[in-house]
Image (cartoon, grey):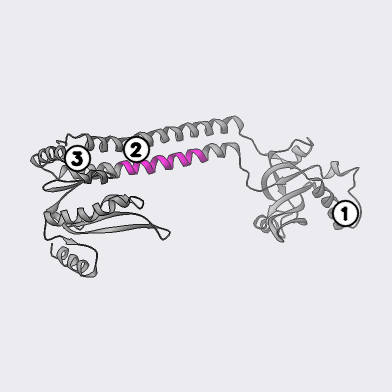
Amino acid sequence: MKNINNEYFNNKIRNNYKHLIISMVFLVISIIFLIIGKSYDSRHIMKEELMNDIKLMEKESNKKAYIEVATKPYLFAIYKTDGKEEKYKYYIVMDQQRKLYVIYIDDETYEKLDTDDINIHPVKISGVAKLMPLSILEHAIKAYNDSVGEELLNNDNYLQYLGVLYLDTTPQIEFKDVYYFIFLISILISFFIFLIFIKNYIINVFSLKKLSVEDKEKIESEIIQLQNEKYKIINLYLASDYLIDLTKNIKILNYKDIVWAYSVEKRKNGLLIGKHIRILTKDKKIYDVAYTKEYEKDKEDLLKEVLEKIKEKNNDILLGYNNENKQEYLKKIKYK
């Protein structure tokens, strides 16, 4: 397929391939962080250990642990934030060996443990063994003594029965999660930019493919003559038979195919940020061309002039946005 040999067309095609290169760069970055994350997993994987075994090591915290809970949880401490109870609360539980533990669980986990047959069918809960804050330890000792009606736990024996660790079941963010997060973001960016490349590639190829060799040669020669045209500053070339827009990608429209054209205001949060021309064709497609920014006041008159020039090329074109032109456009495309 013959392409139009022109530096502006070639630059537009090359610029689109930059999207592909950037997409590949982010893909490589995502793969690198996936490999790092997997490697970190294999080197830092922690096997769950029985909470009681970790308790015997006294202050060795931040290890993955589990408890086979065999008693209903006994609530003894609730934290409040701005007067509202937090989702997670502190409880005292026992396993089948009647060993004491402090656990930090949410209401959903509590409901799983609050069963009448838990002493027969223990429920496993998993989390991370953490060093107990002094205030929680004091509350736990007092709560246990209150529950049994006598002072069985004190400062001399709490290490033997309760220990200094509690099981935290809140979701833990591990270092590997940072790698996987960067991987996910990078792969999404890569995919998004690749879609932009594919979209522009299809538009560029379609715009050139529908032209005959003679038309391409004619456009090629005319663009050379149009280099000094004032419309070039809005990336627009008005050739004898075709409107050529190079704003975001290559758009080549035959004046004979244009049914309706009008100026469009682009707004963001109610504020005008730019204007461009919208063109509707016989095949019911919509093309936005000749973009200008709000502060480019000198280019606004060019848009009006472009619309008049398009009308000169094809007197049947409906010009301007109004209800009459809208109804006329719908009639025209209905019978195509």
Determine whether, in the image, residue 313 is placed left or right of residue 174. Answer: left
Check disc 1 and report its element: helix, strand or loop: helix
Residue marked by disc 1: 145
Residue marked by disc 2: 19
How far apart are labels 3 and 2 at the CA level? 29 Å
- Pointer 1 or 3: first along the chain: 1
Q: Residues within 10 Å of mark 2 (few under 14, many from 20)?
A: many
Judged by its main secondary structure, the magenta piece is helix
- Pointer 3 or 2: first along the chain: 2
Residue at (19%, 35%) from the top-left corner? 6
| Of 9 and 102, the residue lying toward us | 9
Residue at (22%, 38%) from the top-left corner? 9
Residue at (52%, 41%) from the top-left corner? 181
Q: Image quadrant of residue 326?
A: bottom left
Q: Residues within 10 Å of mark 1 (few under 14, many from 20)?
A: some
Label 3 amino acid? Asn
Q: Is residue 184 magenta?
A: yes
Label 2 amino acid? His
* Residue 188 in picture, x, y percent from top left: 43, 43
CB atoms at circles 3 and 2 under 8 Å apart? no
Residue marked by disc 3: 228
Q: Image quadrant of residue 115?
A: bottom right
* Residue 134 in picture, x, y percent from top left: 82, 45
| Number of the front mark, 1 or 2 | 2
Check disc 2 and report its element: helix, strand or loop: helix
Q: Which residues are magenta?
A: 181-197
- For residue 325, above or below residue 223: below
| Number of the front mark, 1 or 3 | 3
Q: Residues within 10 Å of mark 3 (few under 14, many from 20)?
A: few
How far apart are labels 1 and 3 at the CA level? 93 Å
* Residue 106 in picture, x, y percent from top left: 67, 55
